Amino acid sequence: MLNNLTAHEAHSLLASKKISSVELTEAVFAQIEKTENKLKAYVTLTKDEALKRAKAADNNGNFTGLAGIPIAIKDNMCTKGILTTCSSKILANYLPPYDATIVEKLAAAGAAPIGKTNLDEFAMGSSTENSGFHTTHNPWDLNTVPGGSSGGSAAAVASGECILALGSDTGGSIRQPASFCGVVGLKPTYGRVSRYGLVAFASSLDQIGPLAKDVTDSAWLMNVLAGYDPKDSTSVDIPVPDYRMALVNDVKKFRIGLISDLMGKGTDEAVKAAIKDAARKLESLGAIVEEVSLPTFEYAVPTYYLIAPAEASSNLARFDGVKFGHRSSDAPDLLTMYYNTRREGFGAEVKRRIMLGTYALSAGYYDAYYLKALKVRTLIKQDFEKAFKHFDVLISPTAPSPAFKIGEKAADPLSMYLSDIATIPVNLAGLPAISLPCGFSGGLPIGLQIIGEAFAEEKLLQVAYTYEQNTEWHKRRPTL
Amino acid sequence: MKYETIIGLEIHAQLLTESKMFCACSTKFGAKPNTNICPVCTGQPGVLPVMNQKAIELAIKTALALNCKIEKSSVFARKNYFYPDLPKDFQISQYELPLATLGHLDIVVEGKKKRIGITRVHLEEDAGKLVHKGAARIMGATESLVDYNRTGVPLMEIVSEPDLRSPAEAKAFMETLQHLLQFIGVCDAKMEEGSLRCDANISLRPAGEQKFGTKTEVKNMNSFKAVFKALKAEEKRHEEVLSEGGKINQETRFFDDITEQTIGMRSKEYAHDYRYFPEPDLVPIEPSADWLAKIKNTSGELPEAKRDRFLNEYKLPEADAEVLLATPALTAYFEECLKLYDHPKTIANWLMGDLTAYLKTNNLAIEQINLTPAQLVEMLQMIDKGTISGKLAKTILVEALKSGKTIKDIVAEQGLTQISDEGEIKNIIDEVIEKNPKQVGEFRSGKDAVVMFLVGQVMKLSKGRAKPDAVQKLLRQKLGQ
Amino acid sequence: MKIDVEAVAKLARLGLSPEEKKLFGEQLSRILDHADTLKKLNTDKVEPTSHAIPMKNVLREDKVIPCANVDDILLNAPQAEEHMFKVPRIVE
């Protein structure tokens, strides 16, 4: 089945003219036809546009990099003239007047965008249950969540409903769904990939990154995504390496720290066992693995749910019924229009976070909550800096458990927030991290998280690649 | 009881940039609604701001001219509030860490110099424009329309210390500031057009009292005159309330320029809570010493220093200095002339006299004339050489201003060169003596004053081209024979 | 921690049902109680981190680039008139 190919495999076949991009794209849509009603990974499909791009790639015939590869885009990235909803009712009819920088980059690379994937509304959530439209199902077990917020992208990659996908990660939204769906997810260093056109959730934490079937594909997609963008003041102007060069099967003498704080009572036994196995595997390949403690980790979750909602409360103010998106039909005056539009347009989790963030920034509470959180953020960053004096990379579980059941945590927001304990500190410190499959429990995948220093994506890729080349987990595919 | 008035001003000045503060849209005024807009300044989901270097440099230039301390690190912050003219529903401004602090501006009121403290100078973005339907103002309107052309235009906010003690001082402050902003070229500073705006905080306290009284904020003052009138009215209102034992409510008041009274704006049902926090999409401004030096170099000499130089070095009277410094263009014109012709007073006389008169009559600004400083100087040099007379020069100047022709061409075309050839003058004198026997007789019989009449006749016949002193000398010689 | 849900919702221009007000009040109180664990950390001498990757002076040249998609921007307006965005009566 062509749709189950990785991007680099498909590339070889395209380059040697054994297959065409149109065939590949049609195979992907055939799979979508077959499984999408069970998965609900997409919000919008753009088959005509995808086939047009595929044809153009075939006509061009010069297949370099991702040319002719069908790719799915998380629906919080702006695509000119194509619905961009953030899985929110408030943006259900929004047609962006511009393309996100990464969408332009994909077009320049000749990739074929096939559709926009489902997410937790405005990327707020860990399960896609907060989507304003529908919940995406995990292809490994349709009764479980695919993770979130990039659950649609992760499920689409895992099920072969696309070759590659883009996700965004604010507190784990690429890595946790990658872990739940048994695929590879990379969150780049803050500033490595342009955020221009990514609908902001928490501006100081958001990053776009790849969701892929293996580490090699992640490196290939990073080659297209990474780089300075004059439209994003926080994107960093340093040279972009060829990430494929980091795909070296060797971790000898690599110093790897296993984060002990994430191997305690909050983490499933099966997950702990899988991570310990992975650590031993790396050791057997020549790496030096030691335990390390980052004591401020326990403060990361509360720090995050003060900072992220505060920024979100401001970022989401613009959804007010004046310029775009939903406007309530019950709008006798401006103030009522605001109240009703936002009440009708936003879901419960978004409202909750707007409330939380508004409160954390409000007069009298700013110092106690928001400023305090920014200071603790410094301590968390310093903890990482200390650890990286001794270690090349750090490893941990990506999530404390495999995918949970749909509905299981929906009633308890705090427990949902706490399940992001392993991924959140990485965003607070702006670091790169990758999640890749390292085992299964009850038929559900388990993810290994590898964290690096700022702009050390190559090291992550090398360790991940070595692990992958010496294990078989990434070759398993769900049967639907 | 006698009261002391305390006034502090908050000024907003639109900076003279081509593009907006955070996007590449034009700042041009008067375009069709919503044409100078883009995804960024309309707050489309996903867009990001990028700072305009020129805007920052103009604000720093101003801060330096106001003797401020430029902060080592300054940060933009989001000011959060919902309003349709604010597309993101927050304004990017500066809060805890402004661009510059602790400066001062000297003003002169009734001949006395006074130093007014500047609290801070910071940058922010302008809001859009609302057009109300069904009524002239927001009150009574049935719907409103929003134009985002102005949204994102760079604004500089200048906040003064509460150092002003009268409406006259407030007006003088605004005038001095306007002059400075225009002079250093950061803002065209026209209150009537809204490129310079001002809100005032005013309070009164019993003379001798240290504690400030309750203040009100006065808005909608669209001219210097309005600043003065509004504050006068508000000062009077405070005084009346206080002297009757009443209390001033802390509130915002709107100046109505028809009734010339301030009106309390309906107080909001809840207090503003702007929830400022550092703008995560922008990075700090940390000007290096080099960058600051470069900006300072573009400022040139400030008006005050120029004034001192005009008085002391050029020995110009104070009134002349005042006039020459009135507009930056006139000052520049004067200094341009001076580079070519080292007679400051002569240049000043011509600029303040004939040139200014011409501009006034024709309702022109000096920027609009074709006559270059080099041309003017050429004319002055012709006078010095005696090629033309001072009197003729006045005609030539007007002709040059009107026609745009060069001085040389005008002089040549009209044969206006001064006649210094004695033979030619003598011929004219002979003609005058012949035509005016009566006056000649009177002169010869001792009526000396009549000589001026005869000189006048000679001048007339020569069409003003004869040199008057030469004429008189030759005439006396001839009649004395 | 007790929260004035009404006031916060007003600031955020969020219309909430009575049930939502009650639910959010409870949930936010719990979350904020949990956030109070941060108080255990002494941060007196700690600088706040707004940006994880420190940067400064990212500027653009003052150059006008007209936007090609002005009409697409207006196309999204829920209501427009005379090339402007229309909003209902403003009462404060």
Image: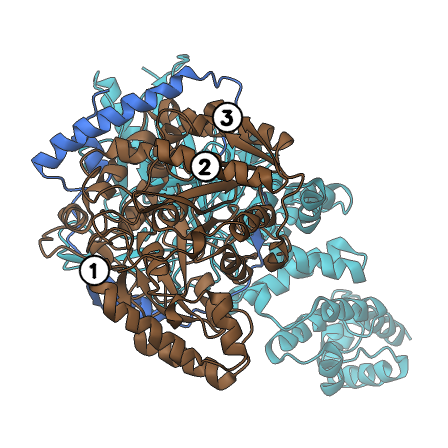
Chain colours: A brown, B cyan, C blue
Q: Nearer the viewer, mark 3 or mark 1?
A: 1
Badge 2: few (under 14), some or many (20 or more) residues near its Cα, within 10 Å?
many
Count of numbered marks = 3
**x 64%, y 79%: residue:** B404
Q: Is residue A384 left or right of residue A23?
A: right
The residue that disc 2 covers is A275
Query: Horizontal and vertical percent for residue C51?
Result: 50, 39
* Front residue (pair A76, A224): A224
Badge 3: few (under 14), some or many (20 or more) residues near its Cα, within 10 Å?
some
- Taking B141 as reference, is B265 above or below it? above
Residue at the farthest right position: B481
**x 76%, y 41%: residue:** B312
- Taking the image as drawn, is residue A112 in sight? yes
* Front residue (pair B173, B415): B173
The residue that disc 3 covers is A294
Tell me the tag on residue B283: none
Q: Is residue A253 left or right of residue A182?
A: right
Instruction: Please state which amino acid type lies under the numbered disc 1.
Output: Lys
Instruction: Please state which amino acid type lies under the numbered disc 2.
Output: Ile
Instruction: Please state which amino acid type lies under the numbered disc 3.
Output: Leu
- Taking A79 as reference, is A342 above or below it? above
Report whether mark 2 lies on the same chain as mark 3: yes
Alpha carbons under labels 3 and 1: distance apart: 41 Å
Q: Is residue B298 left or right of residue A291?
A: right
The residue that disc 1 covers is A38
* Front residue (pair B201, C76): C76
Query: Horizontal and vertical percent for residue A173?
Result: 37, 46
Q: Is residue B142 left or right of residue A138?
A: left
